[in-house]
Amino acid sequence: MHSPMEQFEIKRLLHFNLGGLDVSFTNSSLWMIVAVILATGVFVVGMRQRALVPGRLQSVAELGYEFIAGMVRDNVGDQGKKYFPFILTLFIFILFCNVLGMVPFSFTPTSHIVVTFAMALFVFVGVTLIGLARHGLHFFSLFVPKGVPWVLLLLLVPIEIISYFIRPFSLSIRLFANMLAGHTMLKVFGGFVVMMGILGGWAPLAFIVVFTGLELLIAFLQAYVFAILTCLYLNDAIHLHH
Amino acid sequence: MRTSGYSALAAGLFGSLLVSGTAFAAGGMPQLDYHSFAPQLVWLAIAFVVLYLVMSRLAVPAISDTLDKRQAKIQGDLDAAEKANEDTRALVAAYEKRLADAREESRRLQRTQAETDSALASARFTELGEKLNGRIAEAEKRIAGQRDTVMAGLEQMAGEIAQSAYAKLAGQPADEGALGAKVAAAAKETGR
């Protein structure tokens, strides 16, 4: 029987080498590209008509747009407008990768820590640079909670600093672990179906059906969480609120 | 603090999964194979940048343009509806004003008509009354004339009767002048 972890294996479909750097086109790359193509299909081809009364595909595109636009407006405010295309891209990319991962025999790029960590680190570094550029050294007041006695500050400031620098890890591990756990679980229960045969296999099969629904919810929810946390970090950097 | 709580949770989950993952897979987790990092990161960068360009250059302007246009259209329609509503209200107000004016005018006409009518009627009434009074006066005059004639006749008759009665009683004809005066005085005394 196959290992439940086999589905996460990176398979090189086309071998490329760029000055000693392995840039092979893998199954992960394939599904990233599929996600980009499908997202382009919804958001560009769907918006081709620019109808005042939208059709189905255009409604989907507008819904996604307004969902993230509302999120950025509510969590960051007007200064967040500049970063809206980035957060929309982040959300759509993660959402499409997660949901496409639910297609049988596909691959989930977001089930790899290196992918999610790269995105989280980019967000973290970007947000920190935005904060420093906007507020200079005053940015570090983010680590000093207001209205706290100075004795407590000795304790709180290190905690704040740690919780700040742990952000890229929590952000990336949350997404990666959810994808990993969900897909592993589905695979394990798929193994149970085979193991328990035609008589007993129905129970894990029923579980898989229900769990697939839950996984679809999680696929959306994790993309949402990633996007909204990015908004909150951005808000911290722009407004220094705590 | 919330994020640190989350991260602790995630780290715990990650750790347990690492253990279970290594237990499942003899060769370890594919996620930890650092040889696969470079191609994943390169293609992540390519895919993400392409999607970002598509979104920021094509999708976002198209959608925001469409939403703005729709908003403008809806606002325009609402304004037009509001204007039409106001026009209708103005029309209704004008109609009601004209109706009230017409009512007032008709009341005024009615009143003047009634006044003219009553003036005319009273004039004709007076005229008729005068005519009637004239005829009454004429009739009275005529009656008085006739009565005078009758009375004169009566006096004469009374004189003649008195003369004949005097002649019969006295056996000689009476002095006509004296008797006439006496009869006239008696007639006056009895008062017609």
Image (tube, grey):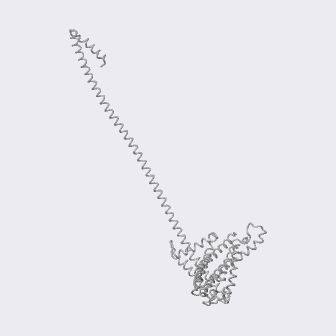
* Residue B169, picture quadrant: top left
* Residue A80, picture quadrant: bottom right
Instruction: Tell me if residue A205 comes above or below residue A80 in the rendering.
Output: below
User: Which image quadrant: the N terminus of chain B?
Assistant: bottom right
**Would residue B138 be found to the left or right of residue A94 on screen?**
left
**In the orientation shown, which residue stands out farthest toward the front?**
A199
Q: Nearer the viewer, residue A69 or A102?
A: A102
User: Which image quadrant: the C terminus of chain B?
Assistant: top left
Where is residue B57 drawn, in percent x and y?
58, 77
Q: Nearer the viewer, residue B139 or B39?
A: B139
Where is residue A33 drawn, in percent x and y?
59, 83
Where is residue A89 drawn, in percent x and y?
60, 77
Where is residue A11 drawn, in percent x and y?
62, 89
**Residue in view at x 73 percent, y 69 percent:** A145
**Would residue A49 be found to the left or right of residue B36 on screen?**
left
Residue B70 visible here: yes
**Would residue A194 be found to the left or right of residue B161 on screen?**
right
Residue B52 visible here: no
Instruction: Tell me if residue A45 comes above or below residue B191 in the rendering.
Output: below
**In the orientation shown, which residue stands out farthest toward the right?**
A151
Instruction: Tell me if residue B86 comes above or below residue B156 in the rendering.
Output: below
**Residue in view at x 73 percent, y 67 percent:** A146
